[in-house]
Image (cartoon, rainbow, N blue to C red):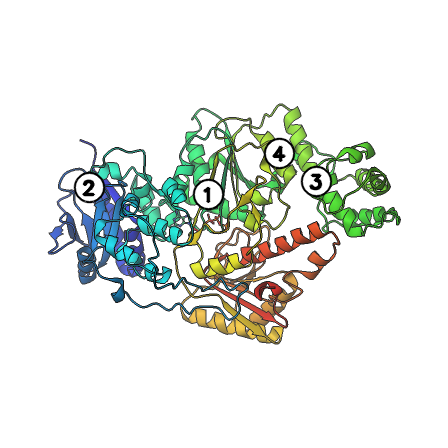
């Protein structure tokens, strides 16, 4: 007989988080004792009259609180399901079923009662349209009262794991709003795929993702086996040891640490026979998956090996965040095997270690580099008739990624994707500008980041790939330009588990799209998509998507990605959009909202004020500070996690981060999109690209909000918010 196991449910963790601090200590003591030996004579199991499951028992925590556990008649697995005040705990046990679904094999919990018609379902307000919406998508709910919402057969419902008792209820649903109102009546394992179907996913896609086809007959009494299925592990976790239990109870709402979605788990724990690409809209848990993947890889490196995993991303702040969160899920041995570094830092550290003779420079952040540009632009030939902006774009898009350093190379290089076509003669007239740039940069000991990245790739190849990385995990893959991807390909040999790349083209704010295949990364068939948004409410998600409506987004590998196949499962209020006449009035409005949040007990560090650029952010923050409200600007280097105060950040800085409340301020015409970022090009292709980057920036900023999003402007409202 196998050893006694204790599994804890996600619902238990939620219920535990609601227990007052004083009693939480007692619950913790009980859970520790229970995990140690659920059969101990010190645990007092009480039968519950009319409980939904015969095997439910209540256990005493203290005078007021009771836990609900499932004590099996046979088998050795005990489930910890709920904790609450005595009567509420009993009521929970009388309302909730906990059973293994005969079709899917998932252990599922749902509110079970006699079937009611949807006429009796609670009414919900569907009039939650924000004051201003860009494309009108936010707040809309299908309200067709004639047709059933789902056109599935009984067999299809059953295949998804829908308990037959709720089948009539689901069949009667006519709108998304009605469907949302019966959420608690369905196991989440079924609500979710049906919700995706309501959002437009095809049955085929859902079947592939959610329907279990590999298993034979399910033994509905075998909890131990059910607990090995990914569908169950999303809601139950078998506690391995005391330390893990302690850490779970200390952060009961950080579900991502253990309760992975089956679509996430399937990506994490397996051998992949080469590079993998994981797409997913904002908040779908790409970073979470990447972190668990890194942990899994670290666990699977042979003990004696000195190999390591590189976890890289694009921004410094996100790298800090990832390092911080990895500490929550990895042992110190695992951590020691994972190096977290954003790509710029990796390149500069690597080259420094090899006595690189150049200084790495970035556009607009190095005075000498800017002077060299001014000097080179003196050489433009007026007969070519191209604006200065053309030369900068040509440098970024063609010269740097293709490492063009000779005129002959420039004659030959492909300029596919550029708005202006050039013949050989024109190229010849243009070349002196780039020749001057190349020569002056060299004389001044400067290299662009792009050149330096490719120099690093060369060095890795020339020194025989002695880097000792077994795998590389890449977050924010959409912003890795061709140079970084080319380098990354060289950092690890082509082998199983070599590259794991997560990203989202909707969030590309730095670079232009690059096809991974063009950089030697071949994902052939190893591509997956995450579809459940865990972060934002559905209202915020819809609003953020409306900013990118009707724009084609790529899949990081030269093809198109869909924008319509992801959903949030949490509901909230639609974004609050306000327009003011002056920045002072806008700051005052923001302060009032912040004070209200404070009254509700929201901590300042859970609020972030975001602006497109620093100037309006600084203006508003100085007014806020004058009110005595503490602020803290998120910058490149600091670990911000434990400092108090409202967070302030530009849109670029909040990438990859999240906050309970987000205020996007100065969403004004001229700032969003930023006039000087979009106006200094005459190339229509480039202009479109910049518009897309600007839209993506606003989309990224909106999708940082967990609970609620506020957007305000002073003066004329951004055209992105008025649908123009
Ligand atoms: N399995 C899960 N269970 C509970 N919460 C989860 C799970 N997966 C992700 N989350 C939570 O969802 C939020 C978004 O996750 P994450 O940052 O990994 O998403 P992302 O796809 O990388 O987002 P973005 O692209 O917008 O930066 C986080 O708060 C994370 O903790």
Is mark 3 in CB contact (under 8 Å) with mark 2? no
Can you give x and y, in whole percent of width and height, for residue 188 in the image? 31, 51
Q: In this view, does 548 lie above or below 588?
A: above
Q: Which of 638 and 51 is in front in this view?
A: 51
Q: Mark 3 points at which residue?
A: 416
Residue at horizontal 37 percent and vertical 59 percent from the top: 176
Q: Where is residue 278 in the image (x, y as percent from the top left)?
A: 49, 41
Q: For the residue labelled by badge 4, is the local secondary structure a helix, a strand or a loop? A: helix
Residue contact at pointers 1 and 3, CB within 8 angstroms: no
Determine the residue positioned at 75% across, 39% down. Answer: 399
Mark 2 packing: few (<14 Cα in 10 Å), some, or many (20+)?
some
Q: Name the residue under label 4.
A: 519
Residue underneath mark 2: 37
Q: Distance between the residues labelled 3 and 2?
A: 67 Å
Mark 3 secondary-structure assignment: loop
Residue at 55% over, 59% down = 547
Question: Looking at the image, is 339 positioned above or below residue 305?
Answer: below
Question: Does residue 311 appear to the left or right of 120 in the view shown?
Answer: right
Asked if disc 1 and disc 2 are in contact, CB closer than 8 Å, the reply is no
């Amino acid at each position: 007989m196998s050893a006694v196991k204790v599994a804890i449910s996600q619902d238990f963790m939620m219920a535990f988080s609601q227990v007052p601090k004083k009693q939480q200590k007692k619950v913790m003591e009980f859970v520790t004792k229970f995990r140690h030996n659920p059969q101990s004579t010190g645990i007092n199991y009480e039968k519950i009259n009319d409980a939904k499951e015969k095997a439910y028992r209540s256990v005493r925590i203290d005078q007021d609180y009771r836990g609900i556990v499932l004590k099996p008649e046979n088998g050795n697995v005990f489930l910890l399901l709920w904790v609450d005040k005595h009567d509420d705990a009993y009521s929970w046990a009388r309302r909730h079923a906990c059973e293994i679904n005969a079709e899917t094999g998932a252990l599922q919990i749902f509110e079970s009662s006699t079937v009611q018609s949807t006429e009796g379902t609670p009414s919900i307000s569907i009039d939650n349209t924000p004051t201003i919406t860009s494309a009108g998508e936010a707040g809309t709910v299908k309200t067709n009262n004639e047709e059933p919402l789902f056109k599935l057969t009984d067999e299809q419902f059953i295949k998804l794991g829908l308990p037959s008792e709720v089948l009539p209820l689901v069949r009667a649903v006519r709108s998304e709003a009605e469907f949302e109102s019966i959420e608690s009546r369905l196991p989440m394992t079924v609500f979710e795929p049906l919700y995706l179907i309501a959002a437009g996913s095809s049955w085929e896609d859902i079947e592939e993702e959610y329907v279990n086809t590999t298993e034979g007959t399910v033994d509905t009494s075998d909890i131990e086996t059910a607990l090995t299925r990914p569908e169950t592990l999303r809601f139950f976790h078998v506690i391995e040891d005391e330390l893990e239990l302690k850490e779970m109870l200390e952060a009961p709402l950080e579900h991502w640490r253990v309760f992975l979605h089956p679509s996430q788990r399937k990506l994490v724990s397996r051998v992949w026979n080469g590079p993998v690409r994981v797409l997913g809209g904002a908040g779908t848990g790409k970073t979470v998956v990447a972190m668990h993947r890194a942990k899994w890889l670290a666990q699977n490196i042979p003990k004696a090996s000195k190999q390591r995993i590189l976890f890289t991303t694009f921004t410094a702040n996100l790298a800090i965040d990832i390092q911080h969160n990895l500490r929550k899920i990895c042992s110190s041995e695992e951590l020691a095997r994972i190096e977290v570094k954003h790509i710029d830092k990796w390149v500069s550290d690597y080259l420094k270690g090899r006595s690189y003779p150049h200084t790495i420079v970035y556009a607009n952040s190095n005075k000498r580099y800017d002077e060299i540009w001014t000097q080179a632009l003196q050489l433009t030939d007026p007969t070519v008739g191209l604006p200065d902006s053309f030369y900068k774009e040509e440098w970024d898009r063609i010269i740097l990624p293709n490492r063009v350093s000779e005129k002959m190379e420039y004659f030959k290089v492909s300029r596919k994707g550029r708005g202006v076509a050039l013949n050989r003669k024109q190229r010849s007239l243009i070349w002196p500008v780039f020749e001057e740039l190349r020569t002056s940069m060299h004389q001044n000991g400067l290299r662009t980041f792009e050149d330096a990245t490719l120099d690093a790739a060369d060095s890795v190849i020339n020194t025989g790939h002695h880097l000792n990385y077994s795998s590389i995990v890449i977050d924010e893959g959409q912003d890795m330009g061709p140079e970084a991807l080319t380098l990354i390909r060289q950092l690890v040999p082509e082998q199983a588990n070599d590259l794991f790349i997560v990203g989202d083209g909707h969030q590309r704010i730095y670079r232009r799209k690059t096809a991974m295949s063009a950089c030697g990364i071949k994902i052939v068939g190893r591509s997956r998509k995450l579809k459940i948004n865990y972060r934002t409410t559905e209202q915020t998600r819809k609003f953020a998507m409306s900013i990118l409506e009707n724009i084609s987004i790529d899949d990081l590998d030269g093809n198109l990605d869909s924008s319509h196949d992801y959903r949030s499962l949490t509901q909230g209020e639609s974004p609050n959009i306000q327009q003011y006449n002056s920045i002072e009035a806008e700051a005052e409005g923001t302060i009032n909202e912040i004070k209200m949040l404070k009254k509700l007990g929201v901590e300042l560090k859970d609020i972030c004020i975001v602006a497109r650029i620093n100037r309006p952010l600084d203006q508003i923050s100085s007014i806020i500070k004058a009110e005595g409200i503490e602020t803290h600007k998120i910058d490149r280097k600091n670990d911000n996690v434990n400092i108090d105060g409202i967070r302030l950040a530009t849109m670029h800085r909040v990438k990859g981060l999240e906050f309970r409340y987000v205020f996007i301020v100065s969403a004004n015409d001229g700032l969003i999109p930023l006039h000087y970022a979009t106006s200094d090009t005459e190339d229509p292709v480039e202009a479109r690209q910049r518009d897309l980057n600007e839209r993506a920036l606003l989309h990224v900023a909106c999708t940082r909000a967990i609970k609620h999003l506020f957007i305000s402007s002073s003066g004329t409202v951004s055209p992105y918010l008025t649908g123009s």
